[in-house]
Image (cartoon, rainbow, N blue to C red):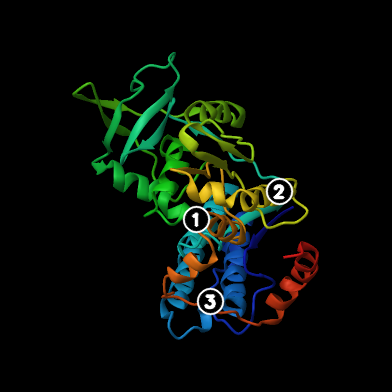
Amino acid sequence: GTVVLLAACVSAPAADVPAKMPAAEVLSPWGERLAMDAQALHDGLSRNHPGAVDPLNPDFTRTNDAALELALSRAPLTADTAGWWWALREYAASFNDAHLDVFLDGEPVSFDQQWAGFLTVWRAGEYIVATRDESLPAVPPIGARLIGCDGRTAADLAADRIGRFRGRWDMDSQKVTHAPWMFRDSGNPWTQRPQNCVFESEGFEASYPITWYPVTLEEVGQRLDQVRPPMRLDIYLKPLEEGGYWIAMPDFTGDTNATLYPRLSALMDEMQANKEQLRAAPYVVLDVRDNGGGSSRWSEIVAEALWGADWLQAHAVPQATSVDWRASEENLAELEPYITMFEESGD
C-alpha cells in the first residue's frame, strides 16, 4: 500500500486534539483515507514541530488547524486517489516550508494524466508556450504568451492551479520548476482546468478553446526534457581564459554514503589547495544548476576558500532568526541514525 510521510515524524492520530471527523459511512475509501491521514498529519505536527509550541509563531497552529479543517471538508467529496493526494499536497503546501512535505512511500500510485496539447514555461514573469503537438487543432503556437483564462489573469491562474499545491509561490524558482503544470492535469479535483484562454503571439491576441487529451507519463517526460533539459552536470574546478575559474557543484548532499559525496569532498580539497589563485582571480563562476540543496557546510567551505575565514568573520551578517529544536520522543528517535552518520563524516 501507499504510505504518506512527513518531514516531521507522524504516527497514529492523537486523541487529545479534537476535530470534526466526517462520518465514516458517508465517505468513499479514499475519503476515509484522506480524513485519517489529514488528522495524523495535523497531530504529528502538533506533537513534534517546534512551531506548534513557539510563542513567537502563533500562525503555525492556526495554519495547521485551518489546513485540517479544509482537508476534512473535502473528505466527503473525495472519490479517488487524486482527490486524496492533492488535498494532502495542499495541506503541506499551506505552510510554505520546503522542509515540510508529504511524499509517497512503497507502491507507486498512478494518476490519469491529461494535457492541453501544449506545455508552458515561465520566463521573465510570463508563461510561454514551449512545446506543442503540431497535429492537434487550435493549439497556440510556440512562443505564444499566456494572457489569461476564463476571465482570470495568468498569474492568478498559476497561483490557484499550481501554487496552492506546491507552496512558496513567491519564489521564482518554484514558477520555473512547476510552470509546465499549468496545462497538465493529474485529476486534481480541487482546482478548475482552464476552458478558454487568450494568448498573444507576434503582437496579436487570440482566444483558444482548451481541449484536454490523455497522455502517458513517458510522453510528458519527453516533452519536459524538451522544455527543461536536465543539466546532469559533473563536479569540477576548471581554469578559464583571463585567469578566471568555473566551479560546478550540482549537488550539496550531506549523506556520506551518497555517490557524489567523495567527489564533493575532493572538490573542496582542490579549492583549498588553490585558494590563493581563486582569491586573485578576476572572476569565479559558481555553477549550481541542478543543485537541489543539502548540507550548508559545503557553501561555508566554498566561501572560506574564496574569501578566507577572517574576511567572513568580519563581514558576518547578524542573524535575525534562530533555530529551535523540539525534543519530543518521536524527534529524538528520528535523530538517532544521525549520530552514526555524523561520527562517520569526519567533519
Q: In 3D space, how far apart are the residues under numbered discs 3 and 2 (Cα atoms)?
A: 30 Å
**As rendered, which of 78 and 210 lies closer to the eye?**
210
- Which of marks 3 and 1 precedes in the sequence? 1
Q: What amino acid type should be assigned to the residue bearing mark 3?
A: Val
Tag in front: 2 or 1: 2
Q: Earlier in the sequence, mark 3 or mark 2?
A: 2
Task: Determine whether the residue tagged by mark 2 lies in a helix, strand or loop.
Answer: helix
Between the C-alphas of marks 1 and 3, the distance is: 39 Å
Hey, which residue is sitting farthest top in the picture?
135
Q: Residue at x 51, y 68 (%)?
A: 310
Q: Amino acid at mark 1?
A: Leu
Q: Amino acid at mark 2?
A: Ala
Disc 3: which residue: 323
Q: Which residue is mark 2?
A: 266
Question: Residue 182 lies in what quarter of the image?
Answer: top left
Q: List x then y, in percent, for residue 128.
A: 34, 31
> How many neighbours does mark 1 have within 10 angstroms: few (below 14), some (14-19), or many (20 or more)?
some
